[in-house]
Image: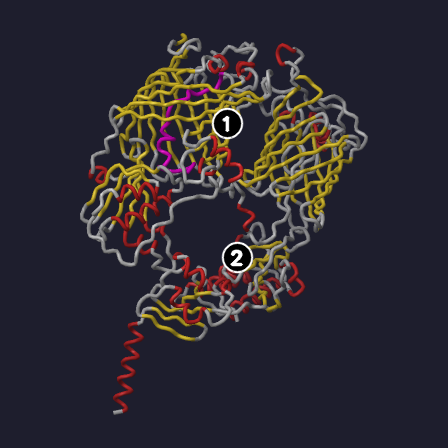
Amino acid sequence: MSKAMIAAAALLLCCGVSHAEVNVDINGQRYSYTDNPRLAEVLKPHALQQNWYWSAAALYRTDTQRAEKLRQQLLALATELAQQSDDAQLRDSLALLQAQVNQWQLADRVNMRVDYDAATVVPALNPRFDTGSYRLVLQRRPNTVFVGGAVRREVSVPHLGASDVAAYTASIKMTPGADSEQLAIVQPDGRVIKAGISYFNRSNTEAMPGAQLLVLFTEPMLDQRFSTLNTLLQQLAVHRILP
Amino acid sequence: MTVFRIPFSLSLITLAVASCAVHAAEGSRWQQSPAGVSQMAHGGVGLIQTPTARMAPAGNLSMNYTDNEEYRLWSVSIQLFDWMESTVRYTDVRNRLYSDDPNFSGDQTYKDKGIDVKFRLLQESTYLPQVSLGIRDFGGTGLFESEFVTLSKKWQNFDFHLGIGWGYLGNSGNITNPFCELKDSFCQRPEGYNGRGGKIDYDQFFKGPASLFGGIEYQTPWQPLRLKLEYEGNDYQQDFAGALAQDSSWNFGAVYQWGNFDFDLNYQRGNTLGFGVHYKMNLHTVSQYKVKPALRTIPEQITRTEITDRDALPKALLHEAGFALQTAHMTDDEFVIYGQQLAYRDHDEAIERIGRVLATEVPAHIKRYRVVNYGGNLPLVETVIEAEQFIAATRYDSLQHEVKSTYIRQAPEQQTLDYSSAPSQTGFFAGSELFWIQTFGNPEAFYMYQAGVFANAGYRLTNNLVLNGTAKVTLLENFDKFNYTVDAQQTPLPRVRTYMREYVTGSTLSMENLYLQWQDQVLPDVYAQAYGGYLETMFGGVGGEVLYRPVDSNLAIGFDVNYVRQRSYENEFDFFDYKTFTGHVNIYWKPEFLPDTQLTFNIGQFLAKDKGVNVDFAKRFDSGIVVGAYAAFTNVSSEEYGEGSFTKGFYLSIPFDLFSLRPSKGRGRLPWVPIARDGGQPLNRPSTLIDATEQRSPFYD
């Protein structure tokens, strides 16, 4: 009898899962929807539970491999550049980058604004989910900024309010081949901007709490591949699920 | 002489509010922007008298007025690309008269125009400075003619500059010209100018005395204030205003930024106080607040099975999408609309608005919408919208809801055009435009103007045949100050354009044009027109044009042929004896290597029977403003041409949408023609196919 109950329950569970079209993991809690829900509907159970920092809220697809392909592309290019370089220090820098990128937790970030208040007011910010599996990360206002890229060790440092990004340079140990003139800032909302940090081009550009500061590689005039490497690095960082 | 036309619907009131409504969008960024670069006295980024290697952000336009005792300088400087700056300038020399003859120019002081360009050769990096090369006041009388190479290096809030200049910037000769060391011909700078002025005097470049110049610009801790110190290489002994006393080669000054304005105050030559006012805007980001209907919301369920209210669709299309519906046709699964876009210059916005109306007004089983856009009577573009995908995108049924991927633009299919007979358009029509003719730098007065109305009326005989006429009514002018009409220069060319003053000072009511015109699409992608009558102010005759222009192609090509006779300026209907064939092969090309740029080549015979090519370069900024320059190179020598050596000009084309609160199409063109004489002059055809077919592969809109 009890075996039959378990079997029936397993069958129901199986069928329930197979009928669900959209699965969303919100900060570890799983939800399934048989109809494709809109963003506000998905956010509703959690939206008012905490004082979320919506600028850092991010939605990822977990059943596609775009970010992983991008990672493999970046790793392959770094390997190629290292193999063709005579500069041992540069090779070490590229190896450090590869090790770092290998550690990154990635998922395909959906390029959209996630904000419950905006979604309830503006139809364009309340789109319907496509069928598939998702991970939705909501967090309170972060108090750190992550530093990565062409650095000896990836670190997270306290966020500095009302300071330009050059103020973080003391915490950055750049590797040989790093571009010391500018940083790429991957803001937590997914926007990427460049900011000068050298004595000649420093401008007042702030990093938002939870931002990633990426140290890029110097781009030699005649080798476009480093430019490609930098582009891939910036694109990939957008898909990162930060610890 | 330049003409600015404004459709009557945009009244003077609209123009009056425009200056306060147009705003730069930069302020919306939450990041603090740096104070940026500032303009020098002559216009263009620099210190006080000397240029630096710095460039303004791409698209920046700065209007400048500066004053330093002997010289008053008005200039406009535009950063066309991030690597190229261009400046045009009028100089008023206070202590020199326009001419020695008071009957000719009264007590007007001397005026001179100039053009500068500067190119960035190297961007600044940790160890290398920014490097730019520039040419100031090239061509013609060039009071400030110079060439320079300049370096800029920034350290924190100090920007250091060092340059070497030849010509005006190097008059003191504080160093030996390095090129003179290499070749003797560089030791002396040739006097005067080539031809009859207006040409680039390459043979003077980098010759004669050379000087080092430089300075420092300091951004003070108070963000709006910058301080400047400069050492200049000019000794003012060769100045047009006379040998000016120079107590010091060091100049210093301050610039205060207030919103989009810069105010500067400086002390030059150790004895002269100077000041300036500069207004800057960005041609990429300048925009206008709009009052327009909300986008129609697409309901979750569309249940409509038939069209019940036949008036609702045309009304909604007009009010919500600016689309004047002429006719419509429905098949089993397609809905086709034919008409004209009257308001939205952005094609994608127009299509989204049209699609949203169609999605809610036509039966739900329709799978495809087709929008056929006409320009006049010409079918120009067919946009095919996949209804299901469009509805999903506009209802935000997907996380990545891109509306643009749900439709394609194509040449109207014959089958689509055959569905419905072309909408009948016979009958009278009328309209009016304000005009403003202005001319700078005349002997009688620096600024002369004439304003009034072009009243246009016509009768459309068939879909393709139109009788068109325009009357010019002058309401306001100071052209009565003209103290001569035809100029005294004797050139062998027929006077096809130099009777300008006679034409514009005729009666206050005159016939601008009166002609019969036929236009049609003769083959797929090929349009043709023919016209005859009084075609423009100065010529009448017959002509025809053919243009091949595929949809969204970077290239359009065609030709026009005209037989024209010069109109009399003594009355409205007579002709003079002068007759000629004129016509060109016309090539319009948007090269991929120059973003948002159109090059136009008109190759053929011009009005004065001279043969050659007119080259036009037009750069479009994101706001829709277009800045252009053109020059005609024909087999007329500069001596035969007369003052200016050849025909050239500049223009600014501004969308009216930037001035009106409601979306609108149409543009005003502000030309600036330094000197126009008879060589290289085309017929001003009353309509051109490239304009009539703009929607096929839009450059302006």
Residue B87's disc number: none
Q: Position of residue B151 (x, y in %)?
A: 68, 41
Name the chain letter of the residue that bears numbered label 2.
Answer: A
Q: Is residue B326 left or right of residue A94?
A: left
Point out the residue furthest to the right here: B247
User: Where is the C terminus of chain B found, in terms of image quarters?
Assistant: top left
**Residues at marks 1 and 2 touching, judged by CB atoms closer than 8 Å:** no
Residue B690 part of the magenta segment: yes
**Front one among A151 and B5:** B5
Q: Position of residue B98 (x, y in %)?
A: 65, 17
Name the chain letter of the residue that bears numbered label 1.
Answer: B
Specify few, some or many for label 2: CA neighbours under 10 Å numbering under 14, 14-19, or 20 or more.
some
Point out the residue furthest to the left here: B332
Residue holding disc 1: B671
* Quadrant of the image occupied by residue B311: top left
Specify few, some or many for label 1: CA neighbours under 10 Å numbering under 14, 14-19, or 20 or more.
many
Magenta residues, dominant SS class: loop
**Front one among B95 and B698:** B95
Q: Is residue B301 left or right of residue B582?
A: left
Q: Which residues are magenta?
A: B678-701
Point out the residue furthest to the front here: B13
* Quadrant of the image occupied by residue B657: top left
What's the residue at 42%, 15% (across, down)?
A: B509
Residue type, mark 1 in image: Pro
Mark 1 and mark 2: span between their CA atoms?
Answer: 40 Å
What's the residue at 67%, 48% (across, down)?
A: B223
Residue holding disc 2: A192
Point out the residue furthest to the bottom here: A1
**Front one among B264 and B528:** B264
